[in-house]
Image (cartoon, rainbow, N blue to C red):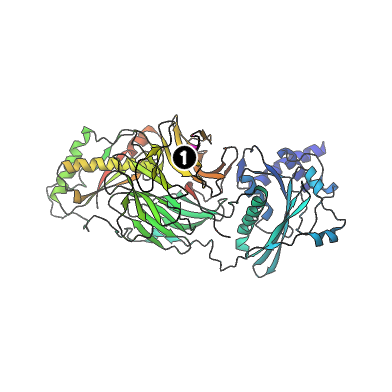
Amino acid sequence: MYKLIVIWVLAALLGACSSPIKLNEVNVEDKSGQAAAAAAMKSLTPAMASGAGDKKGTVANLDTTKDVKSSASSVGSAMGAAAAGASGNTVKSLGAADAGRTIYFAFDSFVVRPEYQSILEENARSAKANKIQRLVIEGHTDERGGREYNLALGQKRADAVRNALSLLGVSDTQMESVSFGKEKPAAMGDSETAMEKNRRAEINIR
Amino acid sequence: MNKFLIALVATFLGVNALAQFRVEVSGAGLTQFPIAVAPFKGNDGMTQKLATIVLADLERSGQFRGVDNGVVPMDENIRPDLPVWRKLGADALLTGSISRTGEDRYEVRFRLWDAVRNQDLGGQSQVAPAAELRRVAHRMSDWVYEKLTGEKGVFSTRIAYVTKSASIFNLWVADSDGEGAQSALRSAEPIISPAWAPNGNQLAYVSFESRKPVVYVHEIDSGKRRLVANFKGSNSAPAWSPDGKTLALTLSRDGGSQLFLLDANSTGQEPKRLAASSSIDTEPVFTPDGQAIYFVSDRGGSPQIYKIPVSGGNAERVTFNGTYNISPSLSPDGRWLAYVSRVAGAYKLHLQDLNSGQSQALTDTSADESPSFAPNGRMIIYATQQLGREALMTSTMDGRVKARLAGQSGDLREPAWGPLVAP
């Protein structure tokens, strides 16, 4: 009885009922002639059975967080195999790890501003002195906008830095420019400060 | 007054019962078919309530409105008093039963009644284990939907999406209502742009696990995957041709972000350049006939959507409103384009009629991303933010009826609607 009131009130609220007929007061089933009617009903079509061994819908899990080394094998990569790490003979010279390695950008821009010239020069010097070093320049954007378009914008920032280094004499075979778009922010949130910190390119040695 | 108090308390409890409905449907369609779904006989005491799942499916489509389903379970052998149901506002009634026929083996039977013409429309019987009962319900929804609308239902299809939770990313494959999600890939680095192969058993996606974006083709049922694009620079935005043989991609290997075509079964073959520009070209998507590709380009100064023949040639601009139009998704009949447009700083899902060029905003949210058409062309799934959290939503084509999907906890993004597959 109580359950009935719940349903009735709910239905009334939803406006789904066109008339306030309480179901238990009404014949919702036509019990007269039921036996005869059952014989006249269409037979049900059997649908394909799903067995427990049915592969459809199976999802196997691949967990890459358990990999010790998460480096993809290269397919068609134009980069030669490069040994990571510095040559280890430096007492005086500045490695790229010592130099600043982050260049920031204005909104919607991929122009490398003059204030970053010294960072570029330091990294270029280090790279030219250590030809084994492989530089990977990573471009990033702030969180506004679509992921793939931002991936392309981040790529423009990485390319701009790579071009600047190239102009300073770093060999193209020593560098790769990639993008993370908006996927790896340096600062969380949508404040102006956070967004400024995310519009960047980072020069990494791998 | 006693009765009033009871009714008031009942209202609260009634609202709670609705809240169990993890799919939150809002809005009302212009013309909705009123249908009553009686509780299935024998379903009491089981976790999966078949009638509830079917009703939620039909309401989410925006084309149906649930009518008081009554208290009394009715099985498929009872002949209902259809004029009474008609008087209650239902044009159709679904009845059925579930019975256990063996160790983890259930038989589900249903029958659909036309309350207007006072007719038995027939029904089906299905046999399945307990774990498959939600899928059984979705097949019923598809049967009812197709019977009453003449169009194919999408309730048995799957969706893919990505979650970020703390520092872990997962690529999920779930039912069309977001339930039953299983992780295909777990990673410590971002995953973006999942794209379903037409066969419904592979996903292409971009992974950052090797600290640069690369594209994998991943077999869902086995977990086996192939690295198809790891060229110098960034590799992203995979899209499948309708015959499943070709992938369109965005590669930065030759400078900039440019479009390429690659054999989907490629093992180290050279990709073929589709278009050459000094601008950003990205987010390719094939037309349903496989003859052309829609894509995003800022060659005109700001990102807009263009169309180019698959054999290359001149690109024709498609979007003209506003200064930022991205993320194209095409309806299966090729007639409609869903995309995201930035309007006064807000990123909003839009729908464009490709014949007339007219477009309309579908949402009142402001951080919409990644629209993807349902394979019957009647709904669009997209990601957005609501109350500060990332969520997945579906919308009808006119934007009137929306549903927020169930899903894993964390931030949900990058939805992709899978294809219709044989039952």
The residue wearing badge 1 is: B339
- Residue B2 lies left or right of residue B184; in this view the side is right
- Residue B204 lies left or right of residue B234; in this view the side is right
Seen as rendered, the residue at the extreme right is A32
Q: Which residues are magenta?
A: B349-356
Up the image or down, A57 lies above or below A176; here it is: below
Q: Nearer the viewer, residue B59 or A115?
A: B59
Q: Nearer the viewer, residue A117 or A16?
A: A16
Quadrant of residue A169 within the rendered picture? top left
Q: Nearer the viewer, residue A177 or A128?
A: A177
Q: Which structural element holds mark 1? A: strand
Horizontal and vertical percent for residue B393?
A: 54, 43
- Residue A171 lies left or right of residue B279; in this view the side is left
Horizontal and vertical percent for residue B197?
A: 45, 55
Horizontal and vertical percent for residue B67?
A: 72, 44
Seen as rendered, the residue at the extreme top is B344
Tag 1: amino acid: Tyr
Count of numbered circles on the image: 1
Residue B330 is a magenta residue: no
- Residue B211 lies left or right of residue B120; in this view the side is left
Q: Is residue B389 visible?
A: no
Horizontal and vertical percent for residue A128?
A: 14, 48
Main secondary structure along the magenta-highlighted residues: strand
Q: Nearer the viewer, residue B262 or B80?
A: B262
Q: Chain of mark 1?
A: B
Classed neighbour count for the residue bearing mark 1: other residues with Cα under 10 Å, few (<14), some (14–19), many (≥20): many
Q: Is residue B194 visible?
A: yes
